[in-house]
Structure formats: structure tokens, C-alpha cells
Amino acid sequence: MFKKLFICVMLAALSLPMANAATQANVPSSIAKPSSDANVLDVDLLKAKINTSLGLTVVKVEKTPVPGIALLITDQGLFYSSYNGEFFIQGKVYSLGTKVTDIAEKSLANMRLDGVESFKDNVIEYKADNEKYVVTVFTDITCGYCRKMHGEMSDYNARGITFRYLAYPRSGINDRTGNLSSGFKDLRSIWCNEDRATALTKAKAGSTVAARICEAPIEAQFNFGRQIGVTGTPAIILPNGTMVPGYQPPAQLEELLKTI
């Protein structure tokens, strides 16, 4: 049986910042005219071309099983490109064999676990007494399903599930005027509180957030979320690095954790 590969393609991502004509006119010839050999992956050249053409910062480049196609992990999420940078792909690439497999998932799982480890001292934790599982959840206090999930924390904890929260302001870091968004400032205030867990619980219950300022890693956590594919909250990272988007009831999450 031949292995088929399916590529979901959205070329020249409409939502991404494009360089203007003046910028394009000044693109170095070594970048503007990529290698004619589409089978050769020059990582530095590809990073430079993607940055110049689309304004994306490429954090990591990996080869994929698809001939001539590279995986790009960027500051705005995950994309694909031809080796020579002539084609840019927004979407997912699946291998269709004995089962459907997202070919980027293994790389993303490892990246998620590395990121979770790097933020281990800057999470807000609700620990289960009889801990069996630890999940990391991107959250925002304005998210209805985040509030619903948090309101059931005692049930999650009773099932042995410890929650560790990372901040993900859904409104972004800056508002339309370029100032820090209210969502960012509220989460920063909570992370700067001397009792983070209580402050977060009160905020999710609808209490006003007392303003505080410190060097909380809200922006770093938000950027990490975007890199690994978070597009909304809640987003749950399981112990194996798999990410599950959206609200999961306590019993359902417990059953999911039993399978990994």
C-alpha cells in the first residue's frame, strides 16, 4: 500500500504581515532568488527569506517526510515551506497510512514539554492530594469555559489531577492603540500577587483584580502558547506533550489521561 500524503494549503497567509513593495525591492539577491535546487534545504537562507517576505521569525526548521517540504516553527505558530522558500503553506500536513498522523505532532509535543519545564517556577498550581496526573493549562480570566473548568477544580483534584496554569491573554499583549491590553495587565497583576492561586480563583469568580506590577512572564508564556499552536483557551497540555483544546469535564479528562 502506498502511503498518501495530504497537505492543507493556504498560500501566502492572508492574516500574516506582508513586506511592502519598497521592502521587496531591497531584498538581497541571494534571498530574492532562492536556490534553483528545490531538494536542497539551506536553513539560514530559508529563515532569512521567510523573515524578509512575511515578517515571521523562524525559531526552528525541520525536514518532513514530504519531499522538498520543511516544517517551520515560528514566533506566530507552525507553518510549512518548500526548501527554497518559493512556497509557503499554512495548515497541517497529514500522513495517511494505517492511521492518520499529523507529522508535526511529535516535534510539537517535545517542544511543549520543554516549554512547560522552562516555566515550572512560574505556574499557578492547584495540587491534588493524591496526585496521579499533572496537566498544564493555558488560561485567561475572561474565558467562560476557563471559569467553568476552574469552578470544578475540587473534582479534578479529587481524581488525582493537578492543574498548573500558564497565562494566555486572549486579547493579546497590546490593544489597538499599542498600549498593554487590559487582559495582559489583569493576568500580570494575578501573577504578581503574593497569593497567586487565591487571586486567580477570585478573578475567575468575577472579583475585580487588584493592580500589581512585577516582572511576570506573561508575554513569554503567551508567545510560547502561540508557537505550539494555542489559538484559544483553555488549552490543555497532557503529560506526554499532546495538547487538547477546549474544556474537558473532570471525568472525561480523567479517562483521557488513563489512555496515555
Image (spheres, helix red, strand yellow):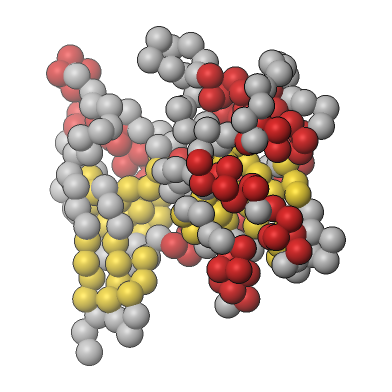
Above or below, 260 relative to 205: below
Q: Nearer the viewer, residue 231 or 203?
A: 203
- Please indicate whether residue 204 sits to the left or right of residue 16 in the image: right
Q: Position of residue 120 (x, y in %)?
A: 73, 46
**Quadrant in which residue 220 is drawn:** top right
Q: Which residue is depicted at the point 56% across and 44% down?
A: 146
The residue drawn where x is 30% and y is 36% is: 50
Looking at this view, is 221 or 137 the one in front? 137
Snapshot quadrant of residue 40: bottom left
- Is residue 202 positioned above or below 128 on the image? above
Residues 209 and 77: in front is 209
Q: Is residue 119 left or right of residue 137?
A: right
Quarter in which the N terminus is drawn: bottom left
Specify whether residue 220 is in view. no
User: In x, y percent, where is residue 49?
Assistant: 28, 35
Work out whether residue 256 or residue 229 is closer to the camera in this orientation and state it: 256
* Count of numbered tags: 0
Which residue is farthest bottom? 1
Q: Residue at x 51, y 46 (%)?
A: 145
Image location of residue 101, percent across then percent down: 36, 71
Determine if residue 231 is in view.
yes
Residue pictured at 55% horizontal, 54% vertical? 236
